[in-house]
Structure formats: structure tokens, C-alpha cells
Amino acid sequence: MKKRLLSGIQPSGTIHIGNYFGAIKQFVDFQDQYDSSIFIADLHAITTVQNKSTLSSNILSVAMDYLACGLDPKKVCLFKQSDIPEVAELAWYFNCITTMPYLERATAYKDAGMKAKEVNVGLFDYPILMSADILIQDADVVPVGSDQKQHIEYARDTAIKFNNIYGETFKLPEPVIMKEVAIVPGTDGRKMSKSYGNIIPLFGTDEQIRKAVMSIVTDSKSPSEPKNPEECNIFALHKLFLKGEELENLKKRYKDGGLGYKESKDMLYEEIVSFIKPMRENREYYEKNIDEVKSILKEGGEKAKNNINAKMQLIRNNVGVNL
Ligand code: ADP
Ligand code: TRP
């Protein structure tokens, strides 16, 4: 029996190379090894996206991104979260055993809370909905970027709490975090994020990618000066695309001096564009065959719902609402 893997991404904006290296690449690499379910976290996205056409088009866009990056619907159950309304039901059971101070400790809430005075209840409850996603599927492993690690701990804590109150119901999921790409920096050097406006879009046009690469922030050293590659935002991104000798050569050119930031950016642009070329071609196929994308999601949704039926009965039995 293969272990069960579950993960998802919110359809809350344009997918970027941080999402690819931090999350989607692992989903693809693991699809043979695990019994995988990958979903589009549309219920989570509603905490921030409250426009009908934007949400619908974002959902389809993430579905196409997944498929273009190499997720194979024959191997992976691909679905959208809202096709399993039981997730919201389970989140409610969890809400009733979760305290406010415990949720106030979530770092994502603290960040959002500091910026906006009035945070919506959905955003506050985000870790509990995510716990429901994970625990309803009996996931063994959850591959995510390191920023999501705390959320997996919420899922584990919530499972323990529920099991203590209602009896053994859930197993404890493990996070899987790829160390070397744990945080992909954005063009400003902070974590690349849809919400910071510092992304390099995974499926941008050549022009959009060039513009993003050229905007990467550097210090003001002249081309001839020696540079420390480990302090350079451009170099941090080269590391994702160059391996072994190629990377060593570049490192040497940084240290020796003579390599300007403009040249380094031009090289990075070429690396990105040639890396994504085959995926871009896949995506063009799905853009032209959107009905196929919709039917993949529909089938995945039905399968995912089937997978959780027995679990949901057990949960309702244990809570006491099944007579
Ligand atoms: P964003 O911050 O852009 O909104 P999400 O929170 O939707 O991204 O993250 C989707 C997935 O991609 C998560 O597993 C997350 O950990 C991963 N991820 C997001 N940004 C990065 C990054 N800069 N580096 C590595 N992984 C990332
Ligand atoms: N919070 C995750 C993100 O922002 C998305 C997500 C929702 C998720 N539910 C999940 C990831 C369950 C893994 C498992 O990327």
C-alpha cells in the first residue's frame, strides 16, 4: 500500500516560480511514489478573492498550471476543494473544539492582522479549514513550502485534540519540506509571493518574465568588481536552474569580478525561458482544450468525494450527529 499524499494551492493569483520549486515540482516528482491527491484550494481563496469571474478563472488557471507542469490525472486525483463540501462541515466540528487564543498564534493571521485592521473570520479560521482538508483525506504526507509548516502543526494538534475528545479518528500527517528550495526569493529579495508583487510568473510571456528579471534588486557594484554570489538575489535564482559545473563556473565569475548584474540577469532570463518552454507548450494545449480540463476536475472531484465518504461517516458517528 502506497502512503497517501495530499497538497493544494490557493487560486488567489498568478502562479510563480516560488510555487513551482517550493510546491508543484514536488507534487510531480512524488506522483509515482505516493497515492496522491492534489487540489485547488478555492474555499481558502475566498478569504481574499471575492469576485466571481476572477475566482472562476483563477481556478481554471491553476488547474492548467498543474497539468502543464506534469501532474498526470491518471496517477493523481486532481480536484477542487469546493467539490467536497464535507471539508467545511469538518472544519465546523474542529471550530467547536478550537480556542481563539490558539488560532491567534498563527503567523499568517498575525501578518494579515497587522496590515489590515479588520480580518475576516475566514482568514482567521484558515488553519482549521486546512486541517480539515488534510485530515479528511487521511493524508500521511503533505508537501509544502516552509511557510506552511506551522499549518501542518495545526492539523496535527487538531487531530490529537479531536481524538482525545471523540476517540481515535484521525492519523497524524507529516510535512515534507524541500530544504534547498525552502524559500525562493522574489525580485525584491523577500519571499516570492503573490501578495508582495515581487513574482516571476511561471507562465508569463517572454516580456513579462524579462521585465520581472530585470527588476531584481541588487547592490550597486560595477561589472568589474568581485561579488559575493551568496548575497545576490539573481544568483539565488540561478541556483534553481543551474547545477554542478555550470553553477560553479558562475560562482567563480561572481568572485573573480567582470560579471555585471545586467549580464547575470540576461543569463537568468534565458535559463527561465528555456526551462519553461516544454511546460508552456503543454499549457497552450490545455488553453485550447478547456473542456478537457473541466472534465478532469469533475472526475477528480467525484473520486475525492468517494474517498472521504467512509471517513465522514466515522466522524459523524464519533461526534454523535448520526443516529
Ligand atoms: P503565495 O505566497 O504566493 O500566495 P501560496 O501561499 O499560495 O503562495 O503557496 C502555495 C504553495 O507554494 C505553498 O506550498 C507554499 O509553501 C509554496 N510557496 C509559495 N511561495 C514560495 C516561495 N517563495 N518559495 C518556496 N515555496 C513557496
Ligand atoms: N495554505 C496552502 C497555501 O497557501 C494551501 C492549502 C490549503 C493546503 N489547504 C491545504 C496545502 C492542505 C496543503 C494541504 O499554499
Image: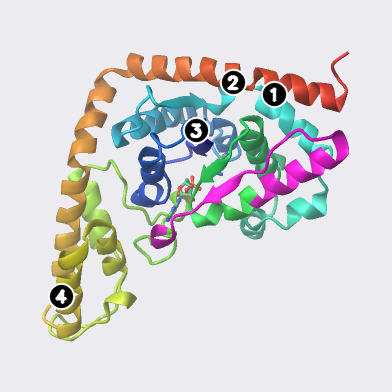
The answer to which quarter of the image holds residue 25 is top left
Residue contact at pointers 4 and 2, CB within 8 angstroms = no
Callout 1 amino acid = Lys
Q: Residue at x 59, y 48 (%)?
A: 174
Tell whether circle 1 marks a residue whose Cβ is less than 8 angstroms from ligand 2. Answer: no
Label 1 crowd (10 A; few <14 / some 14-19 / many >=20): some
Q: Is residue 138 above or below residue 201?
A: above
For marks 4 and 2, the one nearer the N-term is: 4
In front of the other: label 2 or label 3?
Answer: 3
Residue hosting label 1: 311
Quarter of the figure with the C terminus: top right
Residue hosting label 3: 2
In the displayed structure image, the side of residue 216 where residue 257 appears, left or right: left
Distance from disc 4 to disc 3, alpha carbons, whole Å, reads 49 Å
In the displayed structure image, the side of residue 109 where residue 7 appears, left or right: left
Residue contact at pointers 2 and 1, CB within 8 angstroms = yes
In front of the other: label 3 or label 1?
Answer: 3
For marks 1 and 4, the one nearer the N-term is: 4
Q: Which residues are magenta?
A: 153-181
In front of the other: label 4 or label 2?
Answer: 2
Q: Which disc, if any, is residue 307?
A: 2
Distance from disc 3 to disc 1, alpha carbons, whole Å, reads 18 Å
Instruction: Say what secondary structure mark 3 lies in.
Output: loop
Distance from disc 2 to disc 1, alpha carbons, whole Å, reads 8 Å
